[in-house]
Image: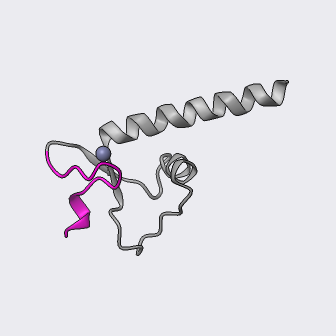
Amino acid sequence: MNHLSVCRVCLATENVKLCRIINSNLLTGYELITGTKIKPLDGLPQHICSYCAAMLMKYKSFRDKCCHAQELQ
Ligand SMILES: [Zn+2]
């Protein structure tokens, strides 16, 4: 399987824009959601599609909001 053109989350391969997860602002959110670390040689896809990236950013924003509110209480 060619991991270079697969979304790590939804496994989409066609008609999607893919970006690399490592060294992006998506890495923290991905690792928080999955409880796993992404390593360059872990044998899994290293990219995420634009749709999953958008959901990831929303989740990260929601989580940050929850944590911030909790600190204020
Ligand atoms: Zn995806």
Q: Is residue 3 magenta?
A: yes
Residue 7's spot in the image, x, y percent?
A: 29, 53
Relative to 51, 35 lies left or right = right
Residue 48's spot in the image, x, y percent?
A: 34, 50
Quadrant containing the C terminus in the rendered view:
top right
In the image, which residues are magenta? 1-14
Q: Is residue 72 magenta?
A: no
Residue extending farthest to the right is: 73
Name the residue at 32% across, 63% down.
45
Residue 18's spot in the image, x, y percent?
A: 27, 49
Name the residue at 14% across, 42% down.
15
Q: Is residue 40 above or below residue 12?
A: below
Q: Quadrant of ligand 1?
A: top left
- Figure disc tally: 0
Name the residue at 48% across, 36% down.
57
Judged by its main secondary structure, the magenta piece is loop
Q: Nearer the viewer, residue 10 or 41?
A: 10
Q: Nearer the viewer, residue 16 or 63?
A: 63
Relative to 59, 19 lies left or right = left
Name the residue at 47% across, 69% down.
39
Relative to 63, 36 lies left or right = left
Residue extending farthest to the left is: 14
